[in-house]
Amino acid sequence: MSRDVDANRHADANRHAEVIRNVNVEHVVVRYEPDDLPRQLVRLAARLADGAVLDRWRAVDRSAHAPHLVAVPDETGEDWRAAALVTARPGTAYLKIVDTVGEVTGAVRAVEAEARRRGLAQLKWEGWTASREDAAAAGFTPLNAPLSQSEGAKGPATGHVRWLHDATVAGSAEPPYYGQTTHFTCGAVTALVARAHAGTLPRQALDRQAELTLWRDATNFNACEPVGLGVALRRAWPASPVTVHLDTDRPVMLDHLPEADQDWRAVLQRASRAEAERVGVPVDPSRLSLTSIRETLAAGRDHVLLLLSLAEMQGFDVPHWVLCHGVVPGAVVIEDPWANAATGDTWVDAHLLPVPDAALEAMAAIGPEGFRGAVTMGS
C-alpha cells in the first residue's frame, strides 16, 4: 500500500485531504464540516439533485462520531465521482455509511478500502437511500428491522452489515434489536434480548410491557444493579442458570446521588444479596475477565450482560447495560439498547456492534473504584 497526502489536488486547500491508494482503489478522506462543505461535494450533489441527502447530513451534530467524507476522484482529479458520509462511535471497530452520493459502487468500495486500511471488523450502511439490491451487490447482508427504537432515536427503517474478515462470527445468529423505551430500562432490555436470541422467548413477546415488568422487578430505582438484576432473572426464568459477577461487596452505582438517597438504595442492594443467597443465585466476587467473556461467548451456551460506562462511546460517564453475544477476531459483538439521536446515532450503530477487546476492558471499569459488574445467563 502506498499513501500520498495532497491538500491541494483533491480538496479545498485548507482541508488537508488525504489521498490514499490501496489495492487499486484510490480515495480521498476529508473531515466533514457541515458549514464548510468541499466544493467537489457541492458540485456533485448539484449535478445529481441530491440536496435532500446533504440536508439530512446537516440535521444533527455528528461531530462526536468523527464524521468524514470518503470520496472517489474523477479522471481529472478536480471533481468527485462519488462520496459517502461515514461515521462511527468512538472506541469501536466499524464504519457506518450514512449515505452515498454519486456512483454507489465506487463510494462503497472506497469506504471498504478505508475500513480495511484501518484494520476494522465491520461496515454498516444505513438504509436512508441504500437499496437492497445495491447493498447486496456490495456484499452486505440486510439487518432485521428493529422491534422498537430507543426513545427519541428515529433511525432508518432498514440497515445493512458486512463483516470484513473470513472468520465466522461466534454467536453469529442475529439477535432481535429492541431499543429501550425509557432512559433506565437497559438492564431489562438486554436480558429480554438474550432470552429471545437463545430462543426461549418469542420475539413477539419482546415489548414494552415485558420491558417495564422485568425492570420493575430488578430496579434499584432507577437503575438495575447486578445482583438485583440476577435475582429478577432467576425469578422470571427459574430453570435458566444465572451467575452474577461483581468484584466489590459495597453498594454500587450510587456515587452520583445525595447521601440520603444512597442510604435507602444500599438497603435494597443488601436485600438483593440476601435474596440471591436464598434462591441460589451465585455472586462471584472475582473480576470477570475479557478472556472469560470471549470463551463464554465462543462456546455459544451463555450470554453475558455487561455493565459499561458510556464515557468513551457517547461522551458521558453513565453506567449502562449491554448484551455481549458474539466474538470476532479482536472484538466482542454487543447489542446496545440505546442510541443517541443527538449525534446521528441510530439502531444501525447499536445493533451487532463490534467493540475491540482493549476498549471493552476500559469501558467495563465502572465508577471511581473501577468495579466490574456482569450477569451470565444460560438457556
Image (cartoon, rainbow, N blue to C red):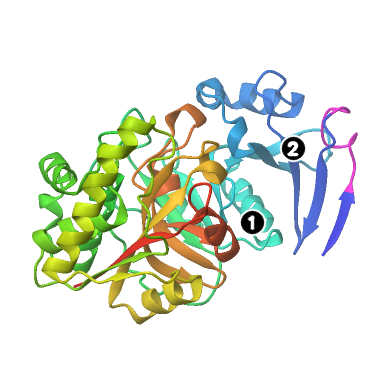
Q: Main secondary structure of the magenta part?
A: loop
Reply above or below: 68 against 47: below
Which residue extends farthest top? 35
Reply above or below: 149 against 294: above
| Left or right position of 257 against 9 | left
Q: Which amino acid does label 2 sit on?
A: Val
Q: Sequence-wise, which precedes: disc 2 or disc 1?
A: 2
| Left or right position of 144 against 205 | right
Residue 259 x, y percent position in the rendering: 38, 33
Residue 105 x, y percent position in the rendering: 58, 50
| Left or right position of 143 against 80 | left
Q: The N terminus lies in which quarter of the figure?
A: bottom right
Q: Which residue is drawn at 72% across and 20% down?
A: 36
Q: Which residue is drawn at 19% across and 53% down?
A: 271
Q: Would you name the residue on which mark 2 appears? A: 30
Residue 54 x, y percent position in the rendering: 57, 24
| Left or right position of 103 against 181 | right
| Viewer-closest of 270 and 48 | 270
Q: Would you name the residue on which mark 1 appears? A: 115
Categorize mark 2 by other alpha carbons within 10 Å: few (<14), some (14-19), many (20+).
many
Reply above or below: 280 against 66: below
Write down the quadrant of residue 149 in the picture: top left
On whether residue 191 falls in the magenta region, the answer is no
**Is the C-beta separation of discs 2 and 1 under 8 Å?**
no
Per the image, label 2 sits on a secondary structure element best described as strand
Q: Give the range drawn in magenta.
A: 5-14
On whether residue 6 falls in the magenta region, the answer is yes
